[in-house]
Image (cartoon, rainbow, N blue to C red):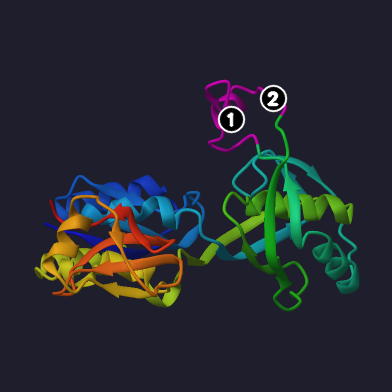
Amino acid sequence: MANGIIIIDKPAGWTSMDVCAKLRGMFHEKRVGHAGTLDPMATGVLPVFIGRATRAVEFAADSDKEYIAGLKLGVVTNTQDTTGEILEERPVNVSGEQLRRVLERFTGEIEQVPPMYSAIKINGKKLYELARKGREVERKPRPVTIHALELEGWPDAGEDFTLRVVCSKGTYVRTLCHDIGQALGCGGCMSSLRRARAAGFTLEDSVTLEAVQAAVDRGEGDALLLPVDAYFSGLPMLVLKTAGAEKKIRNGAALTVRDLPGGEYRVYGADRTFLALGRVAEGRLTTVKSFFQV
């Protein structure tokens, strides 16, 4: 039975759920989930959790993300990217200094109005369902954090700008491109999007669906799966030395621990089996989420 994390380099044209469905068939495992949705036009890092590893999705989804985005100035669309209907075209006369000043304004904590073409629900209806019917509803601005927003060189005439964006969960990069265009007075939209990092994993960790299929055909698919504790590798490791201590953790009971700083830990049995994500507070270890096989 497959259990672990696989980092997919999502191809353009696929939804994140399409990728999960494909992997569900490859690994013959119903429990498959992803961390951080990518729009169909986007490519890049999509962490997918399989089997018991799906219990870690809730932690991975909250992580910061890094993108390389194409910014097309002078064009405004109804979807805020180049897949949508063009609403306006304006002349572009922007200097490097102007653009850099505007990018600075969008760095740090900002507020975004979610796009109509998004899966956010208002009164039980997904916004994109309303948008497809030609309806627009009021959306409240949402706080997001842009940790880094950098111009990657200066394009040749007629080419799009390239931005490096490091941002918090919930950031719409296409809305960021749209808002930058508005601030410059010429309008803009997103022309491409490639995710370079999510949940601590990078493009260097990723594999294509074709490579996964080839490995599965050779009977080597499981070799591509990272153990679930790989996601928590930045946390300190705590090995339980006795069978009694392990039994308490497996039963969901708190464990008295001495001389351990407070915080979260990767908790292992004496045989180095990953048992749980645990939290130490006031000399007691409690389970945040268990990962052992029942």
Determine the image quadrant of residue 204. bottom left
What is the crowding at mark 1: few (fewer than 14 residues within 10 Å), some, or many (at least 20)? many
Q: Secondary structure at mark 2?
A: loop
Which label sits on residue 84?
A: none
Q: Nearer the viewer, residue 108 or 279?
A: 279
Residue in the image at 76% along x and 63% along y: 107
- In this figure, which residue is indicated by the disc labeled 1? 127
What is the span of residues highlighted in magenta in the rendered image?
A: 116-138
Q: Residue at x 75, y 67 (%)?
A: 158
The dot on residue 137 is: 2
Q: Is residue 290 left or right of residue 187?
A: left
Is 123 part of what is drawn in magenta? Answer: yes
Residue 92 point in image, percent of width and height: 86, 59
Image location (x, y in percent) of residue 283: 39, 64
> Amino acid under label 1?
Leu
Tell me: residue 23, above or below residue 213: above
| CA neighbours of label 2 inside 10 A, class few (<14), some (14 to 19), many (20+) | few
Q: Position of residue 240 (x, y in %)?
A: 22, 71
Residue 223 % position (x, y): 18, 72
Q: Secondary structure at mark 1?
A: helix
Residue 10 makes an appearance in the image: no
Q: Quadrant of residue 135?
A: top right
Residue type for callout 2 = Val
Q: Is residue 281 left or right of residue 101?
A: left
Pick whichever, 200 or 93, lies toward us: 200
> At x 79% / y 42%, what residue is drawn?
88
Q: Check residue 23 for magenta coloring.
A: no
Mark nearer the N terminus (2 vs 1): 1
Q: Is residue 164 above or below residue 115?
A: below
Q: Is residue 231 left or right of residue 224?
A: right
Q: Nearer the viewer, residue 292 or 258?
A: 258
